[in-house]
Image (cartoon, grey):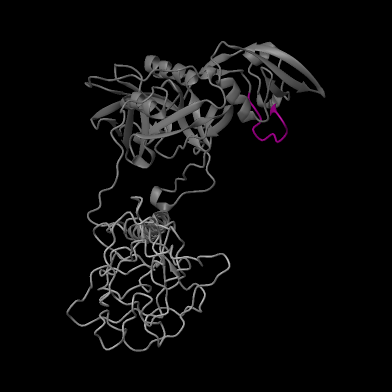
Amino acid sequence: MVAPQAAEPAPPPAHSTNGTHAKPAAPAPAPYGNEAPQPYADPSRPGANAPARYGDGSQSALAPYGDGSQSAPAPYGDGSQPAPPPYGDGSRPSAPSHADDPHPAAPLHSDGPHPVAPPYSGGSHPAAPPYAGGSQLISPPAAHPYPDGPQPPSPVHPDASRPGAPAAPYAGSSQPPFADASQGASPAPRDPWRSYDPWSASGSLQQNGAGVDDMARRRKRGMKILVLGAVVIALVSGGVGGAVGAYLERNGGVGEVELPQAGGGTTGRAPDSVAGIAASALPSVVTLHVSGSDAQGTGTGFVLDKRGHILTNNHVVEPAGEDGEITVTFSGGETADASLVGRDSGYDLAVVKVSGVDGLKPLPLGNSDDVRVGDPVVAIGAPFDLANTVTSGIISAKERPITAGGDGGDRSDVSYVDALQTDAPINPGNSGGPLVDANARVIGINSAIRSAGSGSESDGGQAGSIGLGFAIPINQGKRVAEELINTGKATHPVIGVTLDMDYSGDGARVGDDSDGTVKKGGPADRAGIRAGDVITEVDGQRVHSGDELIVKVRAHRPGDRLELTLRRGGGEQKVTLTLGSSDGG
């Protein structure tokens, strides 16, 4: 049975004689251990369905109340409580009809269409009177529920032969004999609280075979629903978010585009960084534009002093000739005319001077003898007339003998350089520019490159850098520059011999006597060098050709002492000599 839902508590059940509540219950078991419920004898007999079972008169019958509730057993065993008079006039309600009676139940009054069972033994009903001895009182009967109106049908009793049919109550029991409305007197209008049992031990009621959730089950189901809902929401949100993210990623978002940008950083740079070196050296570097009657060119130079002297390569200013024009452009864009101070083709160096220019910043000079292979360097110049170009690299090699020029045919314009090799990119237009160290000091003058092939016609047939650049050591450049500024000419160290430049063997071979190859009274003659000797080392360094011997000698100053190793007649010997001087051309 399912408890009806109500907004107010159920009314209390009938009271027992001891003041405790009579608790409604399911149909009671058989009143005696071995006795089945008493079946009804004959449905045609009036009153045959009365549930009285009075063997000795100690058990009172239960008179149904008019409101449909069950009456409690008579509480008085000794008759101390007055009982109302019995119903002699037959007005007492009769017992309900049998369960298998298809016709409406008999009315409770005796004057109805059906006979009423007499309440006492004097009638036709075979049942024993409620009190055999007559000394006990019965419980007051309930008021007739329908005194004047039409009578409701009597409730149908279940077949007494079926298991679980209600049996007679125990003697002295405080529990009503009928646990549900199907037993007892005729039912009154349906009372919604009649089947509700607030003290039932069952945790849940059932209907149609389905369990009714109690509070714990409802909470568990609620938690499961919440968890499932959260999972569904998370999956849906993830899918929607992923789709939106993918769309925004593919389409670049919505609205106006505002690109992210890093905040303002520091503008200063470390002095030994490329940026720091460039910032320090650029104000001292200039671009030269040279034009003459037959040619023009572009190169680079750097300021030597505040008097306006600028050092560059000889081949940069050579196109100007004797009456050409030389224009100097400073890093800030200022320009000035320059004049030639002196030049030397053997060292490929030249000095020009600007006048009337204030604020010149000389570039400090370093010591090329202290340079080591692998030292970082920075080259500054105007490659292909791109002024203020900065490139960086390292020192790739030292004392690399190179020759340049020689277009005149008599080799008078050939330069011999014991060069510093670098991989810093050097291109046409870098010539004459500074090669500086990490302290922004000049260690070389960029002069030549080795290229893999000729350039295009647009750049005049000039090839670009392949990482093989050469610079004149600044120690040599300093000496030549000083001589050019002071005297207009540069001196060359010499040993006083003429070399056989066609010799194909290893070393530098001195010419024959017939050629006058050993100058009488010169450094070589005083040292004992003879015609036909082959010089193989200079100060312990191997030389493989006449050009290399000239490079090694010009790497020194006049008056320096050299130790030479030579081969003569199948044997070797060492000689020492002091270098002489000759005017440069």
The magenta stretch is 498-508
Which residue is painted at 26% across and 64% down in the image?
84
Closer-to-camera residue (353/78): 78
Closer-to-camera residue (401/384): 384
Q: Is residue 91 above or below residue 529?
A: below
Q: Is residue 398 above or below residue 386?
A: above
Asked whether, in this view, residue 564 is left or right of residue 254, the answer is right
Which residue is painted at 42% across and 40% down in the image?
428
Asked whether, in this view, residue 371 is left or right of residue 16, the answer is right
Which residue is painted at 23% across and 22% down in the image?
357
Asked whether, in this view, residue 472 is left or right of residue 494, the answer is left
Which residue is painted at 48% across and 68% down in the image?
55
Closer-to-camera residue (182/432): 182
Closer-to-camera residue (70/111): 111
Task: Give residue 355's position: percent from left, percent from top.
Answer: 24, 21
Task: Give residue 474's position: percent from left, percent from top.
Answer: 47, 21
Q: Is residue 185 visible?
A: yes
Task: Give residue 129's position: percent from left, percent from top.
Answer: 39, 71
